Image: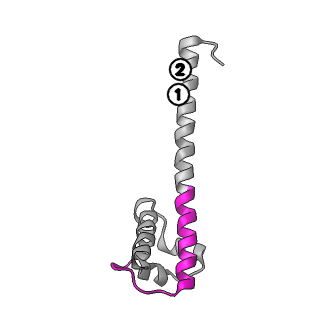
């Protein structure tokens, strides 16, 4: 189970450090205390109740999924705009 705790802690760290989502925000979204987030982010992750861990895991996975989905959408929009601009400039009637 320790490996899974580290994996969850890693995903949580990405949301906090890289994406700038506050620990308080994640705690509120998960319905847990901010202290629970701190305990999971400890190195190594501290023992927390399974119910609390489950709530955090669900919230973190939803956050990671939404973040990835948003990035994919942004990339697809950029590609779409590039294709439209190339069609407009090169073929002036591309549909």
Name, please, the residue furthest toward the front.
1
Circle 1 residue: 82
Which residues lie in the magenta part?
Answer: 42-66
The C terminus: image quadrant: top right
The residue nearer to you, when weighing 8 against 14, is 8
Looking at the rendering, which quadrant does residue 16 occupy? bottom left
Main secondary structure of the magenta stretch: helix
Name, please, the residue furthest toward the left.
43
The residue nearer to you, when weighing 59 against 81, is 59
The residue nearer to you, when weighing 32 against 50, is 50
Q: How is the image coloured?
A: one colour
Looking at the rendering, which quadrant does residue 55 occupy? bottom right
Above or below 69: residue 56: below
Above or below 9: residue 69: above
Mark 1 neighbour density, 10 Å: few (under 14) some (14–19) many (20 or more): few
The N terminus: image quadrant: bottom left
Give the structural element (helix, strand or loop) at label 1: helix
Mark 2 neighbour density, 10 Å: few (under 14) some (14–19) many (20 or more): few
Q: Which mark is residue 35?
A: none
Circle 2 residue: 86
> Residue 40: x, y in percent?
43, 79
13 lies left or right of 54 = left
Residue at screen point 40% across, 84% down: 46
Q: CA distance from mark 1 to mark 2?
A: 6 Å
The answer to whether the residue labelled 1 contacts the one labelled 2, judged by CB atoms less than 8 Å apart, is yes
Residue at screen point 53% across, 84% down: 50
Figure disc tally: 2
Asked if the stretch drawn in magenta spans residue 92, the answer is no
> Residue 87: x, y in percent?
57, 18
């Amino acid at each position: 189970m320790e490996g899974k705790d580290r994996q969850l802690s890693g995903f949580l760290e990405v949301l906090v450090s890289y994406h700038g989502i506050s620990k308080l925000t994640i705690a509120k979204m998960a319905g847990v205390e901010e202290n629970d987030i701190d305990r999971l982010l400890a190195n190594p992750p501290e023992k927390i109740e399974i119910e609390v861990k489950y709530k955090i895991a669900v919230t973190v996975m939803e956050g990671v999924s939404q973040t990835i989905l948003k990035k994919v959408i942004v990339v697809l929009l950029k590609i779409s705009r590039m294709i439209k601009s190339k069609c407009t400039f090169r073929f002036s009637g591309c549909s």
